[in-house]
Amino acid sequence: MALAAHLIKSMVKLKAFLETENNRLWKQNRNKTTISIQTGRFKLSKISNLILF
């Protein structure tokens, strides 16, 4: 049980760290990220359309 609790704590810490890091990077590269996310979504929707139909 102690190991499981320790793992959960570590995961929570890691998640918090990644979220803050992600926010920092997002603010830094907001414009570039927005463009890449939009093209990524476009590609993803094209791929999912190919899979669905």
Image (spheres, rainbow, N blue to C red):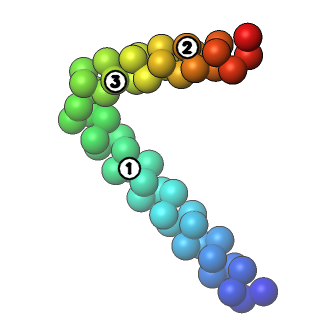
Q: Nearer the viewer, residue 33 or 20?
A: 33
Q: Is residue 8 above or below residue 1?
A: above
| Labels 2 and 3: the sequence-earlier one | 3
Tag 3 and tag 1, C-beta contact below 8 Å: no
**Residue 43 x %, y %:** 48, 18
Q: Secondary structure at mark 3?
A: helix
**Type of amino acid at the residue the image marks with label 3:** Ser
Q: Which mark is residue 49?
A: none
Mark toward the start of the polypeptide (3 vs 1): 1
Query: Quadrant of the rendered structure where residue 12 is?
Result: bottom right
Q: Secondary structure at mark 1?
A: helix
Q: Is residue 47 visible to us here?
A: yes
Picture residue at 48% right of the left edge, 56% below the top: 16
Give me the C-alpha separation between circle 3 and circle 1.
Answer: 20 Å
Residue that numbered label 3 is attached to: 36
Left or right of residue 12: residue 24: left
User: Would residue 34 be visible to someone looking at this image?
Assistant: no
Three-letter amino acid code at disc 2? Lys
Image point 39% across, 17% down: which residue?
Answer: 39
Q: Residue at x 57, y 15 (%)?
A: 45
- The mark lying in front, picked from 2 and 3, is 2
Residue 29, x across and y down, in percent: 23, 31
The local crowd at label 2, few if under 14, some if 14 to 19, many if 20 or more residues have their Cα within 10 Å, is few
CA distance for labels 1 and 2: 31 Å
- Residue hosting label 1: 20
Residue at numbered disc 2: 46
